[in-house]
Amino acid sequence: MKAVICAVALLAASFVTAVSGQTTDAGHVVRPNAIVHTVADLDRSLMFYRGVLGLDVDPSAALPGGSSEALRRLLNAPGAAVRTATLRIPGTDLRLVLAQFSGVERKPLSPRIQDPGVVKTAFRVRDMDAAFALVEKRVSGVITLGGGPIRPEGPSGANRSVITKDPDGFLVEFARQDVPPLPDNISQTSTIIGGWASLITEDLAKSIAFYRDSLGFTFSSNGRPLSPLVLSLQGLPDAAGTVSAASKPPGSAYNWFVYEFKSVDRSTLPARLQDPGTAWVSFLADDVRALLQKMKASGTRVETAGGEPVTVGGATRVVVRDPSGILIELVDAKR
């Protein structure tokens, strides 16, 4: 009789778990970890992000440097050595990593905002006029029409935004907005007060399915057409396209933006981790090996040599590609 009662109790517990939507299986993204820029000159990039924008160096490296065999396998770059610098983005757990490769063939890329595979770094700023004055003469270009900040959305959107190219040619957006509320620990002198990534995709519907089903993003819609003002912000007044503006990774305070551009010349970025101009993203996961097995089962391409995770910097890591060719590092949150 006692055995029957125990069995019924276990069945009831399983039923409650299923109804509540909770899951105990492993293999899920915990939160965004970093945006990584593969740069041509680490010192020059540090001068911009640390010296001009005031980002502080984070000693807990999001991507360790060096030339170990495990690191080379992770990055699928035999013979490479890597110098890295990790910078804190105030107001978020997301970090910016600058990585410079040596000892391996490198082909510099010139990312265009409409090309699938491009990752755009976006910073929330405290004061748009002050931030733009700070960077205007230090960026390699401004792609927003008019050469300065505009108001791309209605009152519920960003107050003002501008998209630039940093000294390495990476697409960097600066946005003044009122949401979400700022945490209390941000310095009143910080120019940057938040950050997120925008992803340029080949097919928005396929990308939404990938980031929802594989990485646990939540999407409030399947996308909406890009308005003329948003296209002006992107420097593409004659293009068309769609965007999912409310795409939130697990554990993130900020929405990420997922775009698909149309009616404009575009070509998938032939990004490799070692090539200057490659921007990629990193996420923390509760169990990298379990997550990778799920992703492999759905056909995700693995970039790490051997197709299996490696331990680098005390954490299990692996690099994969999304359907548009965007490179994604998965890092075990358990260290």
Image (cartoon, rainbow, N blue to C red):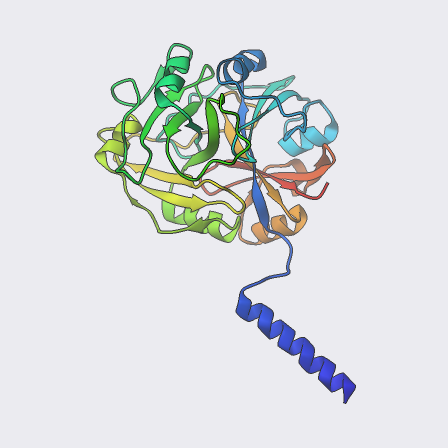
Residue 235 horizontal side relative to residue 29, left or right:
left
Tell me the quarter of the image containing the C terminus.
top right
**Relative to the observer, which residue lies in front, 205 or 287?**
287
View extreme (top): residue? 137
Instruction: Give x and y (percent) for residue 105.
Output: 58, 19
Whether residue 139 is visible, yes or no, is: no
Instruction: Give x and y (percent) for residue 18.
Output: 56, 69
Whether residue 100 is visible, yes or no, is: yes
Residue 167 horizontal side relative to residue 46, left or right:
left
View extreme (right): residue? 2
Q: Residue at x 66, y 28 (%)?
A: 61
Q: Residue at x 42, y 48 (%)?
A: 208
How many labels sit on residues? 0
Residue 174 horizontal side relative to residue 151, left or right:
right
Q: Residue at x 72, y 32 (%)?
A: 313
View extreme (bottom): residue? 1
**Relative to the observer, which residue lies in front, 119 or 6?**
6
**Relative to the observer, which residue lies in front, 164 or 123?**
123
Task: Give the image quarter of residue 185.
Answer: top right
Instruction: Give x and y (percent) for residue 154.
Output: 26, 38
Looking at the picture, does residue 18 appear above or below residue 174? Answer: below
Instruction: Give x and y (percent) for residue 287.
Output: 66, 49
Tell me the quarter of the image containing the N terminus.
bottom right
Looking at the picture, does residue 34 appear above or below residue 8? Answer: above
Looking at the picture, does residue 4 appear above or below residue 101? Answer: below
Q: Residue at x 38, y 23 (%)?
A: 127
